[in-house]
Image (cartoon, rainbow, N blue to C red):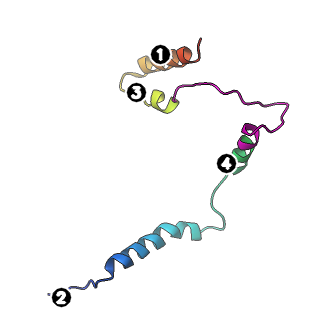
Amino acid sequence: MTSTRGPNWPLLAIIAACVILAAPLWCVASPAMPDYPAHVANFYLITGGASHYYHVEWAFLPNLDTVVGYRAKCDEVATNDFEGFAFASAGG
C-alpha cells in the first residue's frame, strides 16, 4: 500500500483551511458591519465628545452576562436574585 500524502501535506492542509475560512469575506461586496456607526459614536462620547444630550457616567456595575446566565434555579427565583443583586450593586 502506498501513501498518497507527501511530505508537504500539513502545509497544504493549512493553506486549504485558510482559504476556506477566508472565503465568506470574498463572497460579499462589503462585510456586514451595521453597528459600526454606533461604535464610532460611542467612542466619540467616551473620549469626551461634546454633546448636549448624552454624557458618560462611570460606575461599578455587575457583569450582567454571568448574572443573567445564572439560571440553574427556576425563572422566578433567578429573576428575584438578579434584581436583588443589581439593586445592591447599584448602591440602592
Q: Which residue is mark 2?
A: 2
**Gap between marks 2 and 3 measured at Cα:** 55 Å
Q: Magenta segment range?
A: 43-63
Q: Amino acid at mark 1?
A: Asn
**Gap between marks 4 and 1 measured at Cα:** 32 Å
Res 28 quadrant in image: bottom right
Of pointers 1 and 3, the one earlier in the residue sequence: 3
Give the mark toward the camera: 2 or 3: 2
**Gap between marks 1 and 3 measured at Cα:** 11 Å
Q: Which residue is mark 1?
A: 80
Residue 35 has which mark? 4
Determine whether the residue tagged by mark 4 lies in a helix, strand or loop.
loop
Of pointers 4 and 1, the one earlier in the residue sequence: 4
Res 9 quadrant in image: bottom left
Residue contact at pointers 4 and 3, CB within 8 angstroms: no
Of pointers 1 and 2, the one earlier in the residue sequence: 2
**Gap between marks 2 and 4 measured at Cα:** 54 Å
Q: Amino acid at mark 4?
A: Asp
Q: Which residue is mark 3?
A: 71
Of pointers 2 and 4, the one earlier in the residue sequence: 2
Determine whether the residue tagged by mark 1 lies in a helix, strand or loop.
helix
The structure residue drawn at horizontal position 37% and vertical position 77%, both measured from the top left corner, is 11
**Gap between marks 1 and 2 measured at Cα:** 66 Å
Task: Give 89 or 32, whichever is nearer the viewer.
Answer: 89
* For residue 68, side relative to residue 38 (left or right): left
Q: Amino acid at mark 3?
A: Arg
Rendered location of residue 91, percent (x, y): 58, 13
Q: Quadrant of the C terminus?
A: top right
